[in-house]
Image: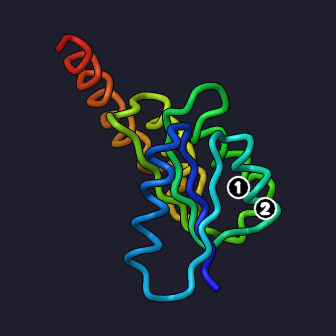
Amino acid sequence: MFEILVVDDEKFIRKGIIAILRRDLNEEVVCLEAKNGIEALEIARRERPNLIVTDIAMPGYNGLDFIKDLKETNKSNNAQIMCMGERVIGIELSKYLVDIWLNCDFAGGSSEPKVNRIIEYEKKYLKDYNKN
């Protein structure tokens, strides 16, 4: 049995993703759902799904908080995590991803100058994006 946790604060989106998954997947799939990051953390710790599809931009305890806390508890069952959102999240997401990348065994901090350039590009992009 393959378990998928779908996390989104918008019910229409959450139910739509679940409907598509159930329709398109031939194998036995159990779809779990959560309407916010706190609920998702509780379900993920208890059920230990194989795949988590989460919105990033949720009010309050957002998708990044959820992912970070889940990984820190070691109760993620090594789930694959897919993130979604309606637009670029920006600097907070960049910082989070860069922090993970720089602290993993293979990076060793040697790529920090390249990462800083990526962050600067992201800042410029967001500045231009917010003008429009």
Q: Nearer the viewer, residue 111 or 77?
A: 77
Question: Residue 88, percent across and down?
Answer: 34, 34
Residue 68 vertical placement versus 128 (above, below): below
Residue at 29%, 22% (x, y): give it: 126
- Residue at label 2? 74
Q: Nearer the viewer, residue 61 or 64?
A: 61
Q: CA distance from mark 1 to mark 2?
A: 5 Å
* Residue 14 badge: none
Three-letter code, disc 2: Asn
Q: Nearer the viewer, residue 28 or 100?
A: 28
Residue at 44%, 37% (x, y): give it: 94
- Residue at label 1? 71
Question: Residue 28, percent across and down?
Answer: 56, 86
Which structural element holds mark 1?
A: helix
Q: Quadrant of the C terminus?
A: top left
Q: Left or right? Give the position of 106 relative to 66.
A: left
Give the quadrant of residue 5: bottom right
Pointer 1 with pointer 2, Cβ within 8 A? yes
- Classed neighbour count for the residue bearing mark 1: other residues with Cα under 10 Å, few (<14), some (14–19), many (≥20): few
- Classed neighbour count for the residue bearing mark 2: other residues with Cα under 10 Å, few (<14), some (14–19), many (≥20): few
Give the quadrant of residue 112: top left
Q: Quadrant of the N terminus?
A: bottom right
